[in-house]
Image (tube, rainbow, N blue to C red):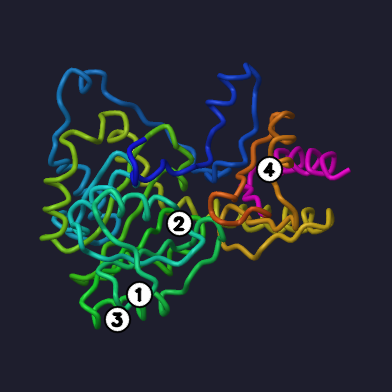
Amino acid sequence: MAAGFPERVIHGGIGKWQQEKNHNAVLDFSASVNPYPPVFTWECDPGSLSRYPDDGYHMLKDTIAHAYRRDPEEICVGNGSIELIRVFCQVVLKPGKKYYFETPTFGEYDLSAQLAGGARVTDPAQSDVRFVCNPNNPTGILRQKEEMDAFLADAVAHNGLLFCDEAFIDLADPNQSMSGVRNPDLFVLHSLTKSFSVPGIRFGFGFGEPELIEKIEITRPPWSVNAYAEAFALEALKHREDLARSRTLIDQERSWLASELTSLGLEPQPSSVNYILVECNRAVQDLSERLAQGGILVRDCTSFGLPTCIRVAVRTREENRMLMEAMAACSH
């Protein structure tokens, strides 16, 4: 690797790779997706595969605009939210520009900003871009909208931009979303992956001022949203209200799972979303490896700077029981 070039970010969601490597079924608690996604039928017209997608994604943006009460010119789309993080940084963080984020948080902000030539600072008042993940990954902490409004006001006061990643907010409390706020110094990122439990369909979208959105749309690779992802998104966006049931069930399971983890002498941290950060009070590499040997994957949080923590997704009761049985066996 070239000297000074940043390293790849470590992510969860390695179930497919583990299954292909070991030829055994795995239960992946390292991927935080909705265990109770809305159920609906959808299809992709086979004829659409013989044509290039509409690179302006006019129908898709119109559908998003209707769902979120925004104008199509305020919406960008991409091949997953990470593509939009990369492109946003290419557009906004030229060499010499500065960025800020609190830790621990999602590692792609730092990597994308570095790749764009940005320099990290420790004071948000000195930054050109402030990244906020809400709810935060991996902590599960949800900031209230009033606090996000204050972050935005501070960014405006210091001639900066607020980048708000709300990939998990539909599984926490959408009333705290900034997606309805129109401000030239705000960009809000969303994703269907987590809320509809479709990590295999890469689709993300964002909201911002038309001038910024146009630059992002020019910079992203052409036709980056494929026909299958577009077809799914068009139908899924009609079922956002169904996520209320998901939130209720996730709340119930999260409480049960936190209680069970506590009974093992672990320290689950308060969470508002579909995963829990668990303080194990010891290095967790051995625990993660032993669980993986039994077909249970958890997120070792060492890469977040939390070497004594794991992050576990909230899944169905039966799956959560299997996790707790494996955890209990590993604690002896």
Q: Amino acid at mark 1?
A: Pro
As rendered, which of 215 and 288 lies closer to the eye? 288
Q: Residue at x 83, y 53 (%)?
A: 264
Q: Mark 1 or mark 2: name the one nearer the start of the chain.
A: 1
Q: Nearer the viewer, mark 2 or mark 3?
A: 3
**Label of residue 124 in the image:** 1
Assess whether mark 3 and mark 4 are in contact (beta carbons under 8 angstroms): no
Name the quadrant containing residue 130: bottom left
Name the quadrant containing residue 182: bottom left
As rendered, which of 123 and 224 lies closer to the eye? 123
Residue 184 percent location from the top left of the image: 18, 70
Q: Residue furthest right?
A: 332
Disc 4 versus disc 1: distance between alpha carbons? 33 Å
Assess whether mark 3 and mark 2 are in contact (beta carbons under 8 angstroms): no
Q: Amino acid at mark 2?
A: Asp
Disc 2 versus disc 3: distance between alpha carbons? 24 Å
Q: Nearer the viewer, mark 2 or mark 4?
A: 4
Q: Nearer the viewer, mark 3 or mark 1?
A: 1
Q: Amino acid at mark 3?
A: Ala
Q: Is residue 117 left or right of residue 29?
A: left
Q: Residue at x 69, y 40 (%)?
A: 288
Assess whether mark 2 and mark 1 are in contact (beta carbons under 8 angstroms): no
